[in-house]
Amino acid sequence: MTTRIKILISIVLISLGVACRLLPHAWNFTPIIAIAMFAGVYLGRRYAVLLPVITMLLGDLFIGFYEWKLMLIVYLSFILIGLAAVLIKKHKSAETILAGSIIAAVLFFLATNWAVWQFSPWYAKTWVGLIECYTLALPFFRNTLMSSVFYSGVLFGAYEAVQFLAYRKKLSFAPEKGK
């Protein structure tokens, strides 16, 4: 894939991510995990780090910034997800993408809610407080998981469909052998 195509895809993904964060949506139902994974699988390590960070920063410029320690964990979670997705590249299949999107949602849930427990005054700094934090976050996890699987299916499916159609078109224009 050429750099020009990677930049074009990046612009589309960032625009999608920012728009989905700014338009009304269910809590935690955004394509950021899927964007990080897509970038890791198809665009490379640099894009896997930059795309989710740029998308989040642009969205946060409009939505507003919050506690820097929490933001750091959120951003680092997306970076880790994108970098882990680079490993999927060699074993890419519908199953690994589905498993990756589920694991990514779990990682995001565990990391970000640990940060909420650790850095906010809302929960006692005990095991009971941590369990309470995770328990109260379960509705958000449902949306994170659903959006991760949904948007991964959309992004990866659309890209593979375009690749397949381009391949078929290329074959249909190939000269016949022997003529």
Image (cartoon, rainbow, N blue to C red):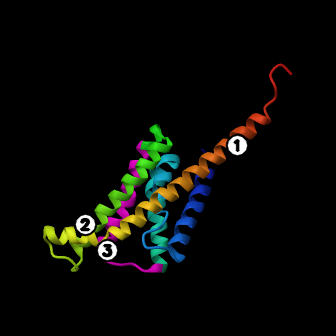
Q: For residue 97, say whether it is visible.
A: yes
Question: Which numbered disc, 3 or 2, marks the residue that appears first in the sequence?
Answer: 3
Name the residue tied to disc 1. Answer: 166
Label 3: few (<14), some or many (≥20) within 10 Å? few
Query: Which image quarter: residue 11?
Result: bottom right
Label 3: state its secondary structure.
helix
Magenta span of residues: 63-87
102 sits to left or right of 7: left
Instruction: Specify the amino acid type for callout 1.
Output: Ala
Which mark is nearer the camera, 1 or 3? Answer: 1
Q: Nearer the viewer, residue 167 or 57?
A: 167
Q: Nearer the viewer, residue 157 or 3?
A: 157
Query: Which image quarter: residue 117?
Result: bottom left
Image coordinates of residue 77 in percent, x first then y, are 35, 60
Rendered position, 50 above or below 88: below
Label 1: few (<14), some or many (≥20) within 10 Å? few
Q: Quadrant of the C terminus?
A: top right
Image coordinates of residue 127 in percent, x first then y, are 14, 67
Name the residue tied to disc 3. Answer: 68
Image coordinates of residue 98 in percent, x first then y, are 45, 49
Image coordinates of residue 107 in percent, x first then y, are 33, 57
Kindly report the distance in space between the C-alpha atoms of the residues bearing marks 1 and 2: 44 Å
Question: Which numbered disc, 1 or 2, marks the residue that appears first in the sequence?
Answer: 2
Residue 131 is inside the magenta segment: no
Q: Nearer the viewer, residue 89 or 129?
A: 129
Kindly report the distance in space between the C-alpha atoms of the residues bearing marks 3 and 2: 15 Å
Residue at x-position 58% and y-position 52%: 6
C-beta proximity under 8 Å, tags 3 and 2: no
Residue at x-position 81% and y-position 26%: 176
Name the residue tied to disc 2. Answer: 114
